Image: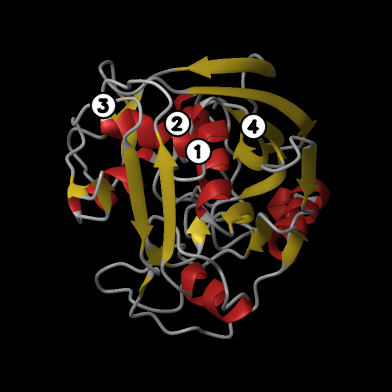
């Protein structure tokens, strides 16, 4: 990738340089433009500039965009299905057990490492040569995730998420049966006051909304469709547990009990969004993976046959 140069001549006065750049460069985020100004990559009439500098009619604003900074991450051949792809983005079907981002103590074997191998030419997002992860899934949650190929697509998809225009549908298996069987959990979520590894419904937490509907009632459990409106950490797990119906296999928010699956039963099954360039609606679906499908069949046939303790009164 090479350095890119852009030049603009102001047709009318603008109160601030950062506002002028935002108007002229809709493909770049405000934070990216702010960093470029701070790095000395923006000049007004040939002179260094600052974000609050006024722009007058006739001023020439020159923007230099350096090539993305390489990440010190190794591509890894990790099987991750790509279920949709175009020039702006791709949608991957993340397997359970795969962490999304590298972190201290976990620098490799992540979705980012897999994407670097799958698509080596992914553009720089935010000035860094890395795949454009738009949102996350928990390590043990499987299913669909959006990945932007360049800054403009990332900006568009992130804006859709913020405006709640990306529609997500999850399939969850819970112990018991929620009451009512169709409803909305509107309960704020924050870190648990006594356990920093957990989230919880907290009075002064961040606004969190999940629509849900029971799809199938089983002897001891229920298959539930969950449609989160917001995107808080562990939101579906916390909200369903708050109804007295924790996810099957969820060791963090459920009680200790035998389970037909070795992880929590949660799968991101459907994503619907607007394609950044065309504005057309794209909807992508993913079937239950084999471990969850097998658990569903076990619970349908006979929960006691598999040593699953009855859960009465939840």
Disc 2 packing (10 Å; few <14; some 14–19; many ≥20): few
Q: What sort of colour scheme is used for the picture?
A: secondary structure
- Residue at 41% across / 37% down in the picture? 9
SS assignment at label 3: loop
Q: Where residue 146 sits: x, y (%)? A: 61, 51
- Residue at 33% across / 74% down in the picture? 106
Disc 3 packing (10 Å; few <14; some 14–19; many ≥20): some
> Quadrant location of residue 292?
bottom right
For disc 1, the marked residue is 26
- Does residue 227 lie above or below 99 as drawn? above
> Quadrant location of residue 93?
bottom right
- Does residue 186 lie above or below 25 as drawn? above
- Residue at 52% across / 65% down in the picture? 123
**Disc 1 and disc 4: Cα gap in Å?**
34 Å
For disc 4, the marked residue is 226
For disc 2, the marked residue is 23
Task: Please report contact status of discs 2 and 4: CB closer than 8 Å, yes or no.
Answer: no
N-term mark: 2 or 4: 2
Task: Please report contact status of discs 2 and 1: CB closer than 8 Å, yes or no.
Answer: yes
**Disc 3 and disc 4: Cα gap in Å?**
44 Å
Can residue 233 be seen from the camera position used here?
no
Q: Nearer the viewer, mark 1 or mark 3?
A: 3
SS assignment at label 1: loop
For disc 3, the marked residue is 16
């Amino acid at each position: 990738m090479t350095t890119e140069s852009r030049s603009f001549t102001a047709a009318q006065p603008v109160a601030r340089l950062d506002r002028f750049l935002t108007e002229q460069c809709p493909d770049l985020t405000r934070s990216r433009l702010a960093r470029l100004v701070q790095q000395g990559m923006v000049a007004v009439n040939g002179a260094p500039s600052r974000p609050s500098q006024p722009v007058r009619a006739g001023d020439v604003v020159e923007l230099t965009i350096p090539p993305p900074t390489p990440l010190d991450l190794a591509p890894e051949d990790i099987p991750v299905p790509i279920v949709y792809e175009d020039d702006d983005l791709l949608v991957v079907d993340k397997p359970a057990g795969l962490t999304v981002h590298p972190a201290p103590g976990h620098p490799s074997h992540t979705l980012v490492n897999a994407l670097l191998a799958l698509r080596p030419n992914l553009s720089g997002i935010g000035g860094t040569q890395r795949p454009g992860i738009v949102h996350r899934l928990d390590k043990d949650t499987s299913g669909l995730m959006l990945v932007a190929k360049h800054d403009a697509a990332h900006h568009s998809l992130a804006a859709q998420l913020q405006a709640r225009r990306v529609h997500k549908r999850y399939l969850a298996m819970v112990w018991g049966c929620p009451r009512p069987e169709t409803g909305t959990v509107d309960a704020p979520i924050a870190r648990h006051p006594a356990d920093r590894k957990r989230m919880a419904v907290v009075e002064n937490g961040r606004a969190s909304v999940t629509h849900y509907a029971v799809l199938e009632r089983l002897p001891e459990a229920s298959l539930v469709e969950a449609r989160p409106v917001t995107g808080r950490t562990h939101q579906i797990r916390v909200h369903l547990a708050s109804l007295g119906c924790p996810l099957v296999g969820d060791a963090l928010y459920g009680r200790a009990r035998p389970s037909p699956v070795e992880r929590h039963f949660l799968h991101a099954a459907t994503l619907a969004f607007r394609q950044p360039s065309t504005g057309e609606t794209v909807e992508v679906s993913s079937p239950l993976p084999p471990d969850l499908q097998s658990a569903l069949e076990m619970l349908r046939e006979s929960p006691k046959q598999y040593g699953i303790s009855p859960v009465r009164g939840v």
